[in-house]
């Protein structure tokens, strides 16, 4: 079997690794539906502890999600448009 090098970048490989956790995929699907939410809103939708949501957001921050501070609240949004396309391919009925 011959090995053929792909054009996928290391950055995209890391993004896919980051997306490999089901909670992170769920966070992304929720953000796709609501555009921007704070941690409390995500906790209410996911029904998991705030610390768990915060941990997953911190792993995705910068490369997959971005955040904006509004007063005391931090609101998260999808910062990488490729992520939405990947989720739409993986979960076509979840738009």
Image (cartoon, grey):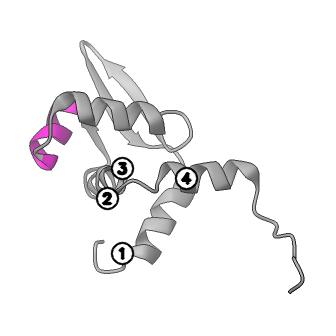
State which region is magenta.
Answer: 38-46
| Residue at 25% across, 34% down | 52
Tag 3 secondary structure: helix
Quadrant occupied by the N terminus: bottom right
| Image quadrant where residue 29 sits | bottom left
Instruction: Point out the tag, 2 or 4, that comes first from the N-terminus.
Output: 4
The Cα atoms of the two marked residues, 4 and 3, are separated by: 11 Å
Q: Quadrant of the C terminus?
A: bottom left
- Taking the spot 56% from the left edge, 57% from the top edge, the residue there is 16
Tell me, yes or no, whether the two marked residues, 3 and 2, touch with CB atoms within 8 Å.
no
Q: Secondary structure at mark 1?
A: loop
Q: Secondary structure at mark 4?
A: helix
How far is mark 2 from mark 1, CA to CA?
A: 9 Å
Query: Badge 2, how many Cα within 10 Å: few under 14, some, many 20+?
Result: many
Instruction: Kindly identify which residue carries mark 1.
Output: 91
Q: How far apart are the alpha carbons under marks 1 and 4? A: 17 Å
Sequence-first disc among 3 and 2: 3
Using the image, tell me which numbered label, if any, was put on residue 29: 2
Observer-side mark, 2 or 4, equals 4
N-terminal-most mark, 2 or 1? 2
* Residue 66 part of the magenta segment: no
Q: Residues within 10 Å of mark 3 (few under 14, many from 20)?
A: some
Q: Secondary structure at mark 2?
A: helix
In this view, 67 is above or below 73: below
Q: Compared to 34, does 36 lie above or below?
A: above
Mark 1–mark 4 CB contact (< 8 Å): no
According to the picture, the residue beneath numbered tag 4 turns out to be 17
Predominant secondary structure, magenta span: helix
């Amino acid at each position: 079997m011959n090995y053929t090098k792909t054009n996928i970048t290391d950055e995209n490989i890391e993004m896919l690794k980051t997306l490999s956790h089901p909670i992170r995929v769920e966070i992304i699907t929720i953000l796709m539906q609501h555009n921007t939410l704070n941690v409390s809103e995500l906790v209410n939708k996911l029904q998991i502890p705030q610390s768990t949501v915060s941990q997953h957001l911190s792993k995705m921050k910068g490369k997959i999600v971005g955040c904006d501070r509004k007063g005391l609240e931090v609101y998260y949004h999808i910062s990488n448009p490729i992520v939405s396309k990947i989720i739409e391919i993986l979960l076509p009925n979840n738009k």
